[in-house]
Image (spheres, rainbow, N blue to C red):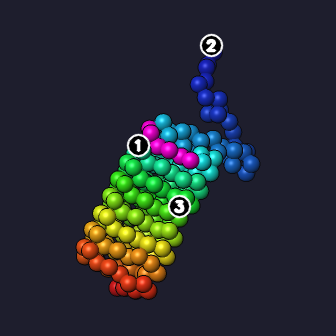
Amino acid sequence: SVALMKDYTELLGVNDRFQLAEMDKLINARNVSRIMESGVTVTDPQNTYIGDDVTVGCDTVIEPGCFIFGKTEIGKGCVIGPQTRLTDMKVGCGVSIANSVCVESEVQSGTNVGPFAYIRPNSKIGKNVKIGDFVEIKNSSIDDGTKVSHLTYVGDSDVGSKVNFGCGTVTVN
Protein backbone atom coordinates (compact mmCIF):
# COMPACT_ATOMS: atom_id res chain seq x y z
CA SER A 1 0.00 0.00 0.00
CA VAL A 2 1.12 3.56 -0.70
CA ALA A 3 0.70 6.59 1.55
CA LEU A 4 0.54 10.07 0.05
CA MET A 5 1.40 13.11 2.13
CA LYS A 6 -0.07 16.48 1.28
CA ASP A 7 2.69 18.26 3.22
CA TYR A 8 6.07 16.55 3.58
CA THR A 9 7.03 18.86 6.48
CA GLU A 10 4.73 16.79 8.72
CA LEU A 11 7.36 14.02 8.56
CA LEU A 12 10.41 16.11 9.43
CA GLY A 13 12.25 15.25 12.61
CA VAL A 14 13.85 17.51 15.19
CA ASN A 15 17.20 16.22 16.41
CA ASP A 16 19.09 19.42 17.24
CA ARG A 17 18.66 23.15 17.80
CA PHE A 18 19.09 23.97 14.11
CA GLN A 19 16.30 21.58 13.10
CA LEU A 20 14.13 22.98 15.88
CA ALA A 21 14.63 26.51 14.50
CA GLU A 22 13.79 25.27 10.99
CA MET A 23 10.60 23.62 12.27
CA ASP A 24 9.63 26.83 14.10
CA LYS A 25 10.01 28.71 10.79
CA LEU A 26 7.76 26.22 9.00
CA ILE A 27 5.06 26.37 11.67
CA ASN A 28 5.22 30.17 11.82
CA ALA A 29 4.97 30.44 8.01
CA ARG A 30 1.87 28.24 8.16
CA ASN A 31 0.31 30.46 10.86
CA VAL A 32 1.12 33.69 8.98
CA SER A 33 -0.36 32.22 5.78
CA ARG A 34 -3.51 31.19 7.66
CA ILE A 35 -4.25 34.72 8.85
CA MET A 36 -3.29 36.31 5.52
CA GLU A 37 -5.75 34.01 3.76
CA SER A 38 -8.48 35.40 6.04
CA GLY A 39 -7.90 38.97 4.79
CA VAL A 40 -5.11 40.20 7.08
CA THR A 41 -2.16 42.16 5.67
CA VAL A 42 1.21 41.07 7.06
CA THR A 43 3.73 43.53 5.62
CA ASP A 44 6.81 41.38 6.35
CA PRO A 45 5.84 37.72 6.84
CA GLN A 46 9.44 36.58 7.50
CA ASN A 47 9.74 38.99 10.45
CA THR A 48 6.30 38.47 11.99
CA TYR A 49 5.56 35.70 14.47
CA ILE A 50 2.04 34.34 14.98
CA GLY A 51 1.03 31.61 17.43
CA ASP A 52 -1.25 28.67 16.68
CA ASP A 53 -4.27 29.98 18.62
CA VAL A 54 -4.19 33.59 17.38
CA THR A 55 -7.22 34.94 15.50
CA VAL A 56 -7.18 38.20 13.53
CA GLY A 57 -10.07 40.04 11.85
CA CYS A 58 -9.99 41.01 8.18
CA ASP A 59 -8.49 44.32 7.04
CA THR A 60 -6.08 44.35 9.96
CA VAL A 61 -2.46 45.24 9.18
CA ILE A 62 0.37 43.59 11.09
CA GLU A 63 3.67 45.40 10.64
CA PRO A 64 7.22 43.95 10.92
CA GLY A 65 8.71 42.68 14.14
CA CYS A 66 5.44 41.65 15.81
CA PHE A 67 5.13 38.65 18.13
CA ILE A 68 1.51 37.61 18.68
CA PHE A 69 0.99 34.55 20.85
CA GLY A 70 -1.40 32.71 23.16
CA LYS A 71 -5.14 33.02 22.72
CA THR A 72 -4.89 36.54 21.33
CA GLU A 73 -7.96 37.78 19.44
CA ILE A 74 -7.60 40.87 17.26
CA GLY A 75 -10.63 42.53 15.68
CA LYS A 76 -11.14 43.98 12.21
CA GLY A 77 -9.39 47.05 10.84
CA CYS A 78 -6.56 47.24 13.37
CA VAL A 79 -2.94 48.28 12.91
CA ILE A 80 -0.53 46.25 15.02
CA GLY A 81 3.15 47.20 15.14
CA PRO A 82 5.81 47.60 14.26
CA GLN A 83 7.77 45.89 17.02
CA THR A 84 4.79 44.88 19.16
CA ARG A 85 4.30 41.86 21.44
CA LEU A 86 0.79 40.67 22.26
CA THR A 87 0.18 37.65 24.51
CA ASP A 88 -3.29 36.38 25.48
CA MET A 89 -4.88 39.70 24.48
CA LYS A 90 -8.39 40.62 23.42
CA VAL A 91 -8.21 43.55 20.99
CA GLY A 92 -11.34 45.22 19.60
CA CYS A 93 -11.91 46.64 16.12
CA GLY A 94 -10.10 49.70 14.79
CA VAL A 95 -7.35 49.55 17.42
CA SER A 96 -3.80 50.78 16.83
CA ILE A 97 -0.96 49.33 18.93
CA ALA A 98 2.57 50.52 18.08
CA ASN A 99 5.93 49.48 19.53
CA SER A 100 4.31 48.14 22.69
CA VAL A 101 3.94 45.09 24.93
CA CYS A 102 0.45 43.97 25.97
CA VAL A 103 -0.19 40.90 28.13
CA GLU A 104 -3.36 39.12 29.36
CA SER A 105 -5.61 42.17 29.04
CA GLU A 106 -8.32 43.76 26.89
CA VAL A 107 -8.16 46.79 24.61
CA GLN A 108 -11.55 47.83 23.26
CA SER A 109 -12.47 49.32 19.89
CA GLY A 110 -11.10 52.61 18.61
CA THR A 111 -8.25 52.79 21.11
CA ASN A 112 -4.66 53.84 20.34
CA VAL A 113 -1.79 52.33 22.32
CA GLY A 114 1.84 53.41 22.18
CA PRO A 115 4.44 53.83 21.11
CA PHE A 116 6.39 52.23 23.94
CA ALA A 117 3.44 51.39 26.18
CA TYR A 118 3.22 48.39 28.50
CA ILE A 119 -0.21 46.94 29.25
CA ARG A 120 0.30 44.42 32.07
CA PRO A 121 -2.06 41.58 33.06
CA ASN A 122 -5.63 42.13 34.22
CA SER A 123 -6.08 45.51 32.57
CA LYS A 124 -9.18 46.60 30.69
CA ILE A 125 -8.79 49.56 28.36
CA GLY A 126 -12.12 51.00 27.17
CA LYS A 127 -13.26 52.37 23.83
CA ASN A 128 -11.61 55.37 22.16
CA VAL A 129 -8.89 55.59 24.80
CA LYS A 130 -5.40 56.94 24.25
CA ILE A 131 -2.56 55.11 25.97
CA GLY A 132 0.48 57.10 24.86
CA ASP A 133 4.24 56.80 24.89
CA PHE A 134 6.03 55.41 27.92
CA VAL A 135 2.76 54.61 29.72
CA GLU A 136 2.38 51.52 31.90
CA ILE A 137 -1.00 50.14 32.94
CA LYS A 138 -1.20 47.34 35.53
CA ASN A 139 -4.30 45.59 36.86
CA SER A 140 -6.48 48.60 36.07
CA SER A 141 -9.66 49.59 34.26
CA ILE A 142 -9.51 52.67 32.03
CA ASP A 143 -12.99 53.76 30.94
CA ASP A 144 -14.07 55.11 27.54
CA GLY A 145 -12.56 58.30 26.15
CA THR A 146 -9.77 58.61 28.74
CA LYS A 147 -6.33 59.92 27.72
CA VAL A 148 -3.14 58.71 29.36
CA SER A 149 -0.80 60.50 26.99
CA HIS A 150 2.78 60.02 28.21
CA LEU A 151 5.19 59.13 31.00
CA THR A 152 2.48 57.80 33.31
CA TYR A 153 1.97 54.72 35.51
CA VAL A 154 -1.56 53.56 36.37
CA GLY A 155 -1.56 50.58 38.72
CA ASP A 156 -4.37 48.87 40.61
CA SER A 157 -6.80 51.65 39.69
CA ASP A 158 -10.30 52.11 38.30
CA VAL A 159 -10.35 55.22 36.11
CA GLY A 160 -13.61 56.75 34.88
CA SER A 161 -14.48 58.02 31.41
CA LYS A 162 -12.98 61.10 29.74
CA VAL A 163 -10.20 61.54 32.31
CA ASN A 164 -7.06 63.33 31.10
CA PHE A 165 -3.85 62.25 32.86
CA GLY A 166 -1.03 64.78 32.89
CA CYS A 167 2.59 63.88 32.21
CA GLY A 168 4.37 62.01 34.99
CA THR A 169 1.23 60.95 36.89
CA VAL A 170 1.44 57.86 39.12
CA THR A 171 -1.51 56.01 40.66
CA VAL A 172 -1.06 52.83 42.73
CA ASN A 173 -3.00 50.57 45.10
Q: In the picture, which quadrant includes the N terminus?
A: top right
Type of amino acid at the residue the image marks with label 3 = Thr
Q: Give the vertical position of 25 relative to 37 (above or below).
A: below
Proximity of marks 1 and 2: CB atoms separated by less than 8 Å: no
Q: Where is mark 3, residue-wise?
A: 84
Question: At numbered mark 1, what does the secondary structure look like: helix, strand or loop?
Answer: loop
Q: Earlier in the sequence, mark 1 or mark 2?
A: 2
Alpha carbon separation for disc pair 2 and 3: 49 Å
Q: Quadrant of residue 148?
A: bottom left
Q: Where is mark 1, residue-wise?
A: 58
Q: Is residue 141 visible?
A: no
Alpha carbon separation for disc pair 1 and 3: 19 Å
Question: At numbered mark 2, what does the secondary structure look like: helix, strand or loop?
Answer: loop
Q: Residues within 10 Å of mark 3 (few under 14, many from 20)?
A: many
Q: Where is mark 2, residue-wise?
A: 1
Residue 84 in the image: x percent, y percent?
Answer: 53, 61
Residue that extends furthest to the top in the rendered view of this protein: 1
Proximity of marks 2 and 3: CB atoms separated by less than 8 Å: no
Residue 58 in the image: x percent, y percent?
Answer: 41, 43
Alpha carbon separation for disc pair 1 and 2: 43 Å
Whether residue 157 sits left or right of residue 70 in the image: it is: left
Foreground: disc 2 or disc 3:
3
Whether residue 41 sits left or right of residue 77 in the image: it is: right
Type of amino acid at the residue the image marks with label 2 = Ser
Q: Which residues are magenta?
A: 38-43
